[in-house]
Image: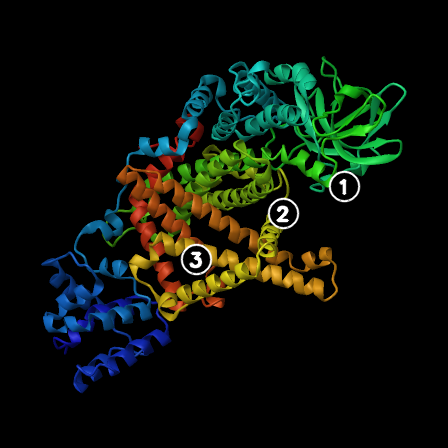
Amino acid sequence: MFTSKSRLFLPLLYIVWSDDLLTADEFNTLSTFIKNQAWLSEDEKSFLESHLNLSIPPTRSDLNAWRKEIAEMVAVNPTFLSFYDLQLKVSADTSLDQYKSLFEKLEQDLGILGSEALLNFTKNNTNQTYNYETNSSFDVVKMTAILDGNVANAINEVKKVISSPEFAYENTTDVHVYREKVLEWCHILAQKNLGNRAYPKKYGGGENLAEYFAIMETLSFHDLSLVIKFGVQFGLWGMSIQSLGTEKHYEKYLNKVGKLELPGCFAMTETHHGSNVKGLQTTATYNHDDQTFTINTPTPKDQKEYIGNAAAHGQMATVFAKLIIDDTDYGVNAFIVPIRDKNNKSLSNVEINDCGLKMGLNGVDNGTISFHKVVIPKENMLDKFASVNKEGVFESPIPSDNRRFFTMLGTLVGGRIGIPRSALAAAKSGLAITIRYSDQRRQFGPEGGSEIPILNYRMHQRRLIPPVAKTYAFHFALRYLTQRYIDKKPEEMQEIEALAAGLKAYTTWHTTATLQECREACGGKGYLSENRIDRLKNDTEVYTTFEGDNTVLMQLVAKNRLSVFRKSVSEMDSMDKVSYVWNQTKVYLSERNPFATRDTSDTHLLDAAFHLNAFYYREHEITVSAAKRIKNLIDSGLNAYDAFNVVQHQMIDVAKAYLDRVVLEQFLHKIETIKEVATKSMLQKLAQVFALHKMEENRAWYLENNYMEAVKSKAIRKMVNQLCWEIRPDAVALVDAFGIPESCLAAPIAKKI
């Protein structure tokens, strides 16, 4: 029978046995603790030991009796500061308060999360699965305003347009009908001056790049074929002229492009060269006699492929080709090349073929283009960074071929901002549909009770709440990237390009994973086309390939980070290096001491400084490790190309660690600017979920590198569970805050009852 002293262990025994994830080692930890307590009698120790036999666990009725006894004691005073306060109340012996620190250490050793453990015994119904309901703790309108920021007017302008009857969804299976509908929508957007928003006012535009990105993102709530068609016409085609051309090109083309009087293409990708822009084989040979260029496709494998707007509607194209003058290759440059006449008939020496049905985006007319010695005038070379003078001599304000090439591509980095923002909008749509459905769909329930919303189930929350947190995190990171790109300085461009490449890859991977989870979380309903998730999934699949293959882009990010690290180290003098080593030693001592690696207190686990330090530590250690390995490989005789090939998998880790840190950092920076308490509190919880879930995903690395012990890893998992549970009442409000028009959700399962 329990004595007053042994009753101190009663809540602990209940938690131990009700947590079927506790290991034999952790049972041994508790057993050893009991044996070492001199204030317990031998009889009390034996009694407690008898309840720690793994081969003879307590019966369900025993557990229920324990819980009932504890709950009855708790009912008198249901508010506790800690789990030990609860234990003390149950024992009813206040003299045992002196052992509080011993038991708090035991909780950490066992990985018991105090706040979660307390909920097992409270009498209120907030922890009861069947009584947990939607009840927003924050103002949705205020949250939407934070998300929209200073481009809210443009966003609302687009929402109004896409909610109009003209934008009713086209559900035909006829590709040609669908393409014409998408073109019709683009014409409506052009008439409302939404396509030319980034162009100079002198040529009919709005000179507002931030609004252009917001317009493209908001259109993504509606139809992704429309977004890509819109992006090809006004972004890739129009902005390639704006970014790579000069005044004569602006004067001749931009107004017509913005009004969609001149449909065009962006012809970079070739069949056998893909992301390797330097390896493109289409040629632009200069003709001295008449000052023209001859554009030619040498072989079928060099045809331009997957070109949006090419198969049906494009009349001209920005073509990337090797400039050849007197048999000398001057590298890849850009040229404006006609492909159809005003009657939309293909020109005789331009061969255009339709890519046909695709996995998604079938409202976009992707095609292949081959040029058979097409002659264009000299002024059709987009000559901002390179030109051919009257004497037929190549000229450039940038003497370095490499620097000129990357400067040219750097002006087109906007595509790597527009695509992830569009992808994230699709993820928001999928989450809005799925969480609304999960809040209303009822299944199973307690014996004799009614069925309950599936969003009340912990596993369902685990599937959906972390993606919501990541979506909010990526939203603020992409807004940060957008602003940096708009405010760009020449010395920052390499970092901005790397960040754009990384966030494009990271966000589109997130969208793919999120929409798959949404499909499964909706069960059979998610498989029905009427509920839109199939379209969202299929249309966004290619986003991981658009603007560069994700894995290739992540290697670009890693090379940039290694270059930055190498440069920072090489610029250190001897004292700087001593200081650097000392600072790293201090970090090692502060973050990898036994107390820190085992600290499982709620305060610590929820601390933003802990999260950010953990992310910085991982980024630094992975980067240093990769740099050392590459150096060792090169020192052993490998050339740099082969050395990088050997460590490609590690390069991806470098990029991921960097991006994790940037995303969390920007999320926390945004939260610091918010004054309204309820909204700020909600975003802080989402940031905590993002950070801890990422640490959980990377727990193998943290464990391997002794940054945390198993008990802390387990506590992090429990804290993610607890945060998901706490956020559940706000889940619907969080997706409502995305501000997606009801007409765009267009899914029967997303209708609010």
Q: How many marks?
A: 3
Read off the residue under disc 3. Answer: 614
Residue extending farthest to the bottom is 42
Mark 3 surroundings within 10 Å by alpha-carbon count, few (fewer than 14), some (14 through 19), many (20 or more): some
For label 1, count other residues whose C-alpha is less than 10 Å away and answer few (under 14), some (14-19) or many (20+).
Answer: some
Amino acid type at circle 3 is Ala
Check residue 556 in the rendering and tell me which mark sits there, or answer none: 2
First along the sequence among labels 3 and 2:
2
Residue 619 appears left or right of 183: left
Q: Nearer the viewer, residue 71 or 723?
A: 723
| Distance between the alpha carbons at the discs numbered 3 and 2 | 24 Å
Reply above or below: 744 against 677: above
Task: Name the image quarter holding the N terminus.
Answer: bottom left
What is the number of the mark on residue 279?
A: 1
Q: Position of residue 682 (x, y in %)?
A: 31, 43
* Image position of 69 (left or right of 441): left
Q: CA distance from mark 1 to mark 2?
A: 17 Å
* Badge 1 or badge 2: first in the primary sequence: 1
Q: Secondary structure at mark 2?
A: helix
Tag 1 or tag 3, which sits nearer the N-term?
A: 1
The label on residue 522 is: none
The residue under label 1 is which amino acid type? Gly
Q: What amino acid is at disc 2?
A: Leu
Label 2 Cα neighbours within 10 Å, binned few <14 / some 14-19 / many ≥20: some
Q: Is residue 401 visible?
A: yes
Determine if residue 299 is in view. Answer: no
Residue 653 in percent (x, y) is at 56, 56
Is residue 201 found left or right of 724 in the rendered image?
A: right
